[in-house]
Amino acid sequence: MPENQIASRLIHHGKVIDVYADTVRFPNGTTAEMDIIRHPGASAIVPFLNDPRSADPQLLLIRQYRYAAGGYLWEIPAGRLDPGEDPHTCAVRELREETGCTAERVEHLYTMFTTPGFTDETIHVFIATGLQRGATAHEEDEFMEIVPMSLRDALERIRTGEIRDAKTALAILYAAGFATAA
Amino acid sequence: MPENQIASRLIHHGKVIDVYADTVRFPNGTTAEMDIIRHPGASAIVPFLNDPRSADPQLLLIRQYRYAAGGYLWEIPAGRLDPGEDPHTCAVRELREETGCTAERVEHLYTMFTTPGFTDETIHVFIATGLQRGATAHEEDEFMEIVPMSLRDALERIRTGEIRDAKTALAILYAAGFATAA
């Protein structure tokens, strides 16, 4: 039972998320009921086609249909953790399934809470280098196109707001600012 | 009715979110039912205490209790849009309510989808400069402490993963990389 949880009531058990109404004790001792979306967590991966410290680093991005966003979004490869799955294993699996690539090196960069006002979802972000191309294995509800893009171009598309998926923008800015400086 | 929506069934009407099961037509013509969390959207604001282009820019951050995250998170001031509220107005209001500050200039930086796999939530990020301190007006379910922090320190806490709220890390990296270069 999570800290400060007094009670928890399942409202909806879904395919991806579970919706709960929890009774919570706040730090000042008051209690209230609040909705919480429980999610298994996910991994995402920034795939570099060449050396990220080179003069012109190249990425592999995905153009993916997102019903909730009302259209297509630019994203990095990502997906939910299988039950008991290690985030690193998940990142490698999603990279292979969504882009067909395997990577020589996959390293953890960052872990984020996506929107902690109403969900416990975390996304673990990895960086992949030394890519080898292979066949993709999309899930049947995934509609995506794989697009090579320079890091410079991706940063410009974040600046203009064309890349507007939070995990993708954060992962690319993080990788651009920190991993390449390491 | 959103594009590609065939049907929509309300599962739960909450205080913050609404949970729907929508029947969706995907780009390849297949249909499926999927859960979607509808959210009114939010604004967030990066408050600079001095010139963001100075040698040592200073921010105002918030240390906020988040039940879904199991503890306290570092965040920038943020909150939900009131019905019909303009995102700019919301950003100014949340800055005042959460930090007690008013700002000479509030400019839009970026708009993100927080986690478009299951919610339509967007967060509009603004930058505030020319701050004047005043009294706070926290909502009763908000437990937070206001903490001045240098941009350099904030970037280091993103690098180490101590700052792990996605909107906060993304907004600070965006403001550090783009706004200060403008």
Image (spheres, coloured by chain):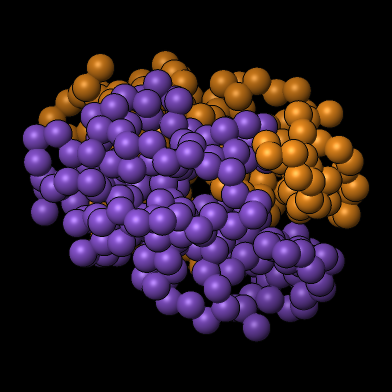
Chain colours: A purple, B orange
- Picture quarter containing residue B70? bottom right
- Vertical side of B20 occupied by A61: above or below: above
The residue under the point 30% across, 33% down is: A149
Question: Would you say B7 lies left or right of B88 here?
Answer: right
Q: Would residue A118 be found to the left or right of residue A157 on screen?
A: right
User: Foreground residue, B153 or B38?
Assistant: B38
Residue A112 visible to the viewer: no
Question: Horizontal placement of A56 versus B113: left or right?
Answer: left
- Which residue is drawn at the image coordinates 74% and 39% (left, top)? B29
Compared to B99, does B10 lie above or below? below
Q: Residue at x 55, y 73 (%)?
A: A82
Give the total of numbered labels: 0
Residue A62, position as x, y percentages in the image: 44, 41
Find residue A168 and report its horizontal and vertical position in percent.
Answer: 42, 43
Q: Residue drawn 59% across and 57% down?
A: A139
Q: Is residue B26 visible?
A: yes
Residue farthest toward the front in the current orientation of the protein: A135
Q: Position of residue A160 (x, y in %)?
A: 40, 21
The quadrant the N terminus of chain B occupies is: top right
**Quadrant that contains the C terminus of chain B:** top left
**Along the line of sight, the residue nearer the viewer: A32 or B125:** B125
Q: Provide residue A24's location: percent of width, then percent of height.
A: 71, 70
Q: Is residue A169 above or below residue A41?
A: above
